[in-house]
């Protein structure tokens, strides 16, 4: 893994998770003076140019979690936020498990299954889709789970914004995961699964 590939968790000034940013975007918000505070572990020490007058070299230290100013419109909209549905986020929500046979698969062996098929009036929404291996999805075909004699091993749910931020992360560090978990609803199915990782 490239040493500068670790994502930084960006939050608003109230500490609500907003998104993942790379080291270049993190340095940019530090340089623009938009960082209110930082926490988590130090990730990067980025060295810039030398000051012509003082001869000193600029250095920006980037932590794993940074709070930034200026996201008030997003904060208001977040209350009714429904994250976009994508296969990578869906597979992450379901821990890369087939929700029918319970087996864990790599992403290329998984598919999006509509619990109530689209052909029967189902919708392409978080509450009507689950991760399924291709074999189970082919077996279920255009039927409901009941009609196909199949049982779901977990109930689908729509992720909150904080949960969705987690699902979008690559290589989430322990301090970032602990921070995100504190923003998940108490009833989140992700609590049990993720608390084993920290």
Image (spheres, helix red, strand yellow):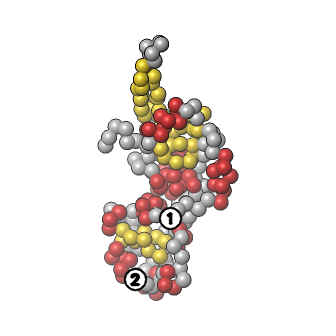
Q: Nearer the viewer, mark 1 or mark 2?
A: 1
Which residue appears at 40% of the width and 83% of the height? 141
- Furthest-top residue in view? 54
Residue 149 at least partly seen:
no
Which quadrant of the rendered structure holds the N terminus?
top left
Occupied quadrant, residue 101: bottom left
Mark found first going from the N terminus, 1 or 2:
1
In the picture shown, does residue 171 fall above or below 190?
Answer: above
Which residue appears at 56% of the width and 64% of the height? 158
**SS assignment at label 1:** loop
Depth check, front residue: 58 or 167: 58
Tell me the residue that label 2 is attached to.
141
In screen coordinates, is 34 left or right of 192? Answer: right
> Alpha carbon of mark 1 to alpha carbon of mark 2: how far?
21 Å
- Furthest-front residue in view? 52
Tell me the residue that label 1 is attached to.
85
Residues packed near mark 2 inside 10 Å, few (<14), some (14 to 19) or many (20 plus): some
In the picture shown, does residue 97 fall above or below 20?
Answer: below
Depth check, front residue: 108 or 149: 108
Which residue appears at 42% of the width and 32% of the height? 44
Q: Position of residue 189 (x, y in %)?
A: 53, 60
Which residue appears at 36% of the width and 80% of the height? 138
Numbered tag placed on residue 28 in the rendering = none
């Amino acid at each position: 893994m490239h040493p500068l590939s670790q994502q930084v968790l960006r939050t608003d000034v109230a500490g609500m998770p907003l998104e993942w940013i790379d080291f270049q975007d993190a340095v940019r918000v530090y340089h623009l003076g938009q960082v209110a505070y930082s926490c988590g572990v130090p990730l990067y020490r980025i060295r810039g140019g030398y000051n012509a007058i003082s001869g000193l070299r600029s250095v920006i230290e980037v932590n794993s979690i940074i709070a930034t100013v200026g996201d008030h419109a997003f904060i208001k909209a977040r209350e009714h936020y429904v994250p976009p549905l994508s296969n990578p986020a869906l597979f992450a929500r379901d821990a890369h498990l087939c929700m029918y046979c319970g087996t864990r698969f790599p992403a290329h062996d998984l598919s999006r299954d509509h619990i109530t098929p689209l052909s029967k009036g189902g919708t392409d929404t978080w509450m009507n889709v689950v991760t399924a291996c291709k074999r189970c999805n082919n077996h279920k075909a255009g039927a409901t789970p009941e009609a196909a004699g199949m049982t779901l091993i977990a109930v689908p749910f729509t992720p909150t914004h904080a949960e969705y931020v987690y699902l979008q992360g690559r290589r989430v560090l322990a301090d970032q995961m602990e921070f995100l978990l504190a923003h998940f609803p108490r009833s989140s199915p992700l609590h049990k699964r993720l608390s084993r990782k920290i």
